[in-house]
Image (spheres, grey):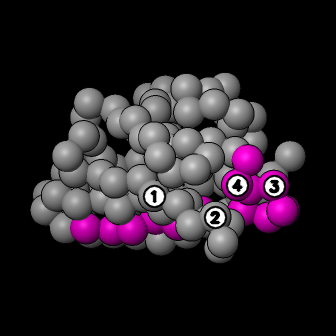
Amino acid sequence: QVQLVESGGGLVQAGGSLRLSCAASGRTFSRYAMGWFRQAPGKEREFVAAISWSGGSTRYADSVKGRFTISRENAKNTVYLQMNSLKPEDTAVYYCAAGVFITGPFTSWGQGTQVTVSS
């Protein structure tokens, strides 16, 4: 398994931007598809975005399409989530995850980073 640590969360005004990072340990990072998920208070965890091991394929939830961009640097064992035009409904704890396929299942999870968007 791979260990994952997210960073980059914080408080931002609506319309602003944040970039989340997820650093992975281990030499097998480039073998994994990576995903970002989020969980808002009182709601179930939901899929946000995912990227294939090579970075050649991505997929997004409809709610973030056109605003969020997932990317990865295999040489740095890091995956990113660039979030633009943030809305209050984007407020959640954001988790990164590693899996075999871009469609899942995702079997390794980070501890999460809080993103709060004020109106």
Marks 4 and 3 sit apart, C-alpha to C-alpha, by 6 Å
Q: Does residue 39 appear anywhere in the picture? A: no
**What residue type is disc 2 on?**
Asn
Q: Is residue 107 a member of the stretch shown in magenta?
A: no
Task: Please report contact status of discs 4 and 2: CB closer than 8 Å, yes or no.
Answer: yes
At 19% from the left and 67% from the top, the residue drawn is 16
Is 6 left, or right, of 100 in this rendering?
left
Is 10 left, or right, of 2 in this rendering?
left
Q: Which residue is mark 2?
A: 74
**What residue type is disc 3 on?**
Thr
Please state the extent of the stretch shown in magenta in the rendering. Answer: 17-31
> Considering the image in quadrants, where does the C terminus appear?
bottom left
Q: Which residue is mark 3?
A: 28
Task: Please report contact status of discs 4 and 3: CB closer than 8 Å, yes or no.
Answer: yes
**What residue type is disc 4 on?**
Ser
Up-down relation of residue 115 to residue 48 (above or below): below
Q: How many marks?
A: 4
Q: Residues within 10 Å of mark 4 (few under 14, many from 20)?
A: many
Task: Please report contact status of discs 2 and 3: CB closer than 8 Å, yes or no.
Answer: no
Marks 4 and 2 sit apart, C-alpha to C-alpha, by 6 Å
Marks 2 and 3 sit apart, C-alpha to C-alpha, by 9 Å
Up-down relation of residue 13 to residue 91 (above or below): below
At 70% from the left and 33% from the top, the residue drawn is 100
**What residue type is disc 1 on?**
Ser
Marks 1 and 4 sit apart, C-alpha to C-alpha, by 13 Å
Q: Earlier in the sequence, mark 1 or mark 4?
A: 4
Q: Residues within 10 Å of mark 1 (few under 14, many from 20)?
A: many
Marks 1 and 2 sit apart, C-alpha to C-alpha, by 10 Å
Q: Which residue is mark 4?
A: 30
- Which label was assigned to residue 35? none
